[in-house]
Amino acid sequence: MKLSIIGSGYVGTTIAACFAELGHDVVNVDIDEDIVAALNDGRSPIHEPGLDELVAEHAGDRLRATTDYEEILDTDATFLALPTPATDDGSIDLGAVKAASTSLGETLAAKDDYHLVVTKSTVVPTTTEEVVGPRIAAASGKTVGEEFDIAMNPEFQREGTAVEDFLAPDKIVLGAHTDRAYDLLDDIFAPLVERADEPPVVKTGIREAEMIKYANNAFLAAKISLANDLANICKEFGVDSAEVLDAIGLDSRIGSAFLGAGLGWGGSCFPKDTAAIIAAARGRGYEPRLLQAAVDVNDGQPERMLDLLRERFDPEGKRVAVLGLSFKPGTDDIRGSRSIPLVEALLDAGADVVGYDPVATENMRELFPDIDYADSAAAALVDADAALVATDWDEFAALDEQFDEMREPVVIDGRRIVTRRDGIDYESLV
């Protein structure tokens, strides 16, 4: 089939390359000429394992990019993969979605045959029906449900494993209102269903599909925060939290996934999505107390880590290495990274901060241009008074004699990956 993807960020680039891998002809539409040039040159504009290879393999053949919306006219369906960043009150900014919907509608005015528009962006319930559809209809002069359809297909791709998550999904959620829309979605995803050994396909309404995405992430975020809350209690009693959480994870009703207690969750999804659904619920007059508690626990973990450091010395004038700047290993994304509040608090305390990350240094440099950055973990530790482990990159687990280069080998481990040994004042956050 011929598909168009509007937006080429983490989601848009990944689904474009993966749809091409499934055999579809895909055109990425983006306003950024540099991104368009990179994709057409076979280079991924983002760091994501496995994506470079797919883009390089399919660019110039089943995958191409353009700034011209007119290219959409030759496609059967368009996926909206646009950013929906959080505003100050936690609600989502639909500016990009609105602008793209209007531009898409203006383009579809010249299309004679049926077209399907699929929201891939994470949006609160009613957005596709009350924002996307009406804007396309107004700009195109066409009728929703007749000359074009709207649908929702939420993404469940984790940064660092996005390609794998798309090509081997736990589930595929298709939200639509008409048989024609469902039939076209079935055709689009048929190669994936066959390839991925028949994953469950959930067919539901558009609002339900929108909500499934938020419910999915809110549940996982709350599970992590509950694990952290329990681990914090364990620490107060001198109990090994890892043994406790490993044991409860054996219960089939609980499961072991997302029980890794530590510094907390971040990224582009969990913080934004929990804030958005909390704001949306409050907008309808409901106070989501449990979700707010999950956010509060998460926000408190960096401060608990700094308290462990302050128990040893006042950070003012001390050199502190922050190991790990991305929000998780396998990505250069620093959005929502737990290292950000750590660095902010250390600077406020007058510490001399040096940061290191295998791939996220340049992104963090844009946020904190005046701190030092090392080109290796070992270099970051030289003459440091303390090291705070913020991201669980594998290379940090391999550190050993490098800690001997510190002035005062104080190691506060926010991810419980460093091996405790003699000669290091080591403490795990949980």
Image: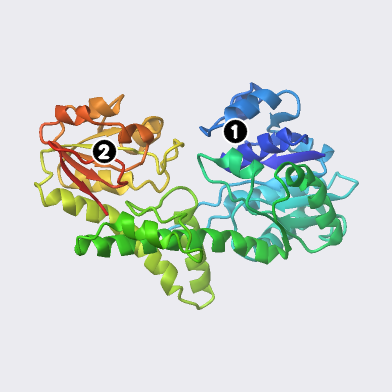
- Residue under numbered circle 2: 322
State which quarter of the image contains the N terminus.
top right
- Residue located at (67% from left, 37% from top): 18
Q: Amino acid at mark 2?
A: Val
- Residue located at (75% from left, 51% from top): 117
The image quarter containing residue 181 is bottom right
Residue 187: where, in percent of width, then height? Answer: 82, 47
- Residue under numbered circle 1: 32
- Residue located at (36% from left, 36% from top): 364
* Tag 2 secondary structure: strand
Tally of numbered tags: 2
- Residue located at (61% from left, 64% from top): 211
Give the alpha-carbon distance from disc 1 to disc 2, as whole Å: 33 Å
Q: Residue lying farthest top?
A: 41
- One can see residue 86 in this view: no
In terms of depth relative to the viewer, which is nearer, 386 or 81? Answer: 386
In the rendered view, tell whether residue 402 sits above or below residue 177: above
**Position of residue 58 in the picture relative to residue 243 (left or right):** right
Categorize mark 2 by other alpha carbons within 10 Å: few (<14), some (14-19), many (20+): many
State which quarter of the image contains the C terminus.
bottom left
Residue 107: where, in percent of width, then height? Answer: 78, 44
Residue 91: where, in percent of width, then height? Answer: 50, 61
- Residue 100, label in figure: none
Q: Earlier in the sequence, mark 1 or mark 2?
A: 1
**Position of residue 308 in the picture relative to residue 335 (left or right):** left
In terms of depth relative to the viewer, which is nearer, 159 or 180? Answer: 159
Q: Amino acid at mark 1?
A: Asp
Categorize mark 1 by other alpha carbons within 10 Å: few (<14), some (14-19), many (20+): few
In the rendered view, tell whether residue 364 sits above or below residue 104: above
